[in-house]
Amino acid sequence: MTGRAAGFIMAGILMISAIFAGGAVSVKAEGEELITSPHGVLMEASTGQIIYEKDMDARVKPASITKIMTLLLIFDELEKGTLHMEDQVVTSAYAKSMGGSQVFLEEGEKQSVEIMIKCIVIASGNDASVAMAEHIAGSEGEFVRRMNERAAGLGMENTHFEDCCGLTESDNHYTSAHDVAIMSRELVIRYPKVLEYSSVWMENITHETDKGASEFGLTNTNKLIRSYDGCVGLKTGSTSVAKYCVSAVAQRNGITLISVVMTAPDYKVRFADAAAMLNLGFGSCQLYTDSEPAKLPDIPVKGGVKDQVSCTYKEEFRYLDTAGTSLENIEKKILLPESVQAPVAKGDKAGSAEYYLNGEKIGSADLIFDESCREAGYLDCLKKVWGIFL
């Protein structure tokens, strides 16, 4: 077993320890390994914490899991407003020529962005992926450059893409189980709408070409959608070089887990290993969310045009427990200054909320100013005095 690779006792389930460091959790145990595939990782989506991993940083071939990054860039453009679901995408001769998994788009055929997304995420269409890459960036090469730029921004240190669909067998096209989990998390947390598509089992699309109209059936390549309770995505992949891989997303009781398996020997092992990690996660994890915190006090401002400013939480605090500890004992301490000096900018850090479980700090959340306050000038002071006089 490698340095951080975790084991798991299949009979008896004895958890030895949970180690918290840098916001990540790694459950370590002794005995038989949980998965038989060479590489895997289980991540809780909202916190990004790792629950289980096996050689997760090794560089491996991603096959069609590459399309997770392709989808991420598509949804980035939708968010920016440079792309719309109803926009029409024209299939080029190059896009049509893609082999492997495809939806058989014809050269010159037009489909909406939404249909193309379905073709990519449900049926893993290589032709649809390239058509979207060309529509967004002008060429697949430029789109791939953006893919690598996005990967670097996410801290995916063991990833480099050469195409947008995973067909290439280039040695320079690689990723890791950990990096797949990272980009999967970015996609499902930032753009949860993708799960509406990735959870579809079967759907028909209509090809409209010079030859007329014809229906084509899309069938999800992720069999866990039907066989695993709560599975809502996300993407599978397989080539002779990459073998079998999957990034499976499942949701139960307010917890979203991402189970990534890479280089499995066959599709049955791929899904069995993904399910085994999900079972571990749902069986051992509980999530604390400070979803309705009490209103924070206003902070007095010295030398400002306002006497005080309000503040709020920068983001919702979440804590993942894998040791079965009672979360009812979590306590919170609010740390705010008695006053601040103007000027104050909205969004700047005002203080922090610290969370403790049984006396030990488990994390914190930034508190930020909810409004701005500029420094008072001579006329402001004069108006204030005149107001008091009146």
Image (spheres, grey):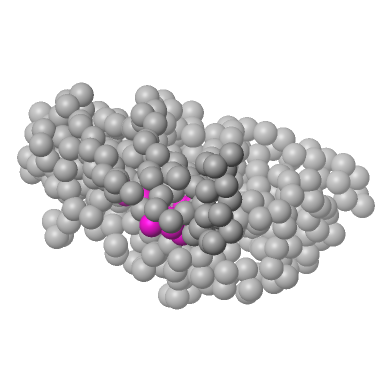
Q: Position of residue 133 (x, y in %)?
A: 67, 63
Q: Is residue 33 rendered magenta in the image?
A: no
210 with respect to 130 (left or right): right
Q: Is residue 344 rendered magenta in the image?
A: yes
Q: Position of residue 330 (x, y in %)?
A: 20, 31
Query: Number of labelled discs?
Result: 0
Q: Position of residue 43 (x, y in %)?
A: 32, 45
Q: What segment carries the magenta color?
A: 341-352
The answer to whether residue 277 is visible is no
Please tell me which residue is depicted at 66% across the width and 55% down the height of the picture: 80
Give 240 or 341, whichever is nearer the viewer. 341
389 with respect to 89 (left or right): left
Q: Quadrant of the C terminus?
A: top right
Please tell me which residue is depicted at 72% across the width and 58% down the height of the picture: 82
Please tell me which residue is depicted at 38% across the width and 45% down the height of the picture: 300
Q: Is residue 228 above or below residue 31?
A: above
Q: Is residue 317 above or below residue 141?
A: above
* Residue 62 quadrant: bottom left
Q: Is residue 217 above or below residue 113?
A: above
Please tell me which residue is depicted at 18% across the width and 37% down the height of the picture: 356
Give 242 or 163, whichever is nearer the viewer. 163
The answer to whether residue 90 is visible is yes
110 with respect to 13 (left or right): right
Q: Position of residue 241 (x, y in %)?
A: 42, 64
Q: Is residue 43 above or below residue 132?
A: above
Which residue is farthest front?
A: 389
Q: Quadrant of the N terminus?
A: bottom left
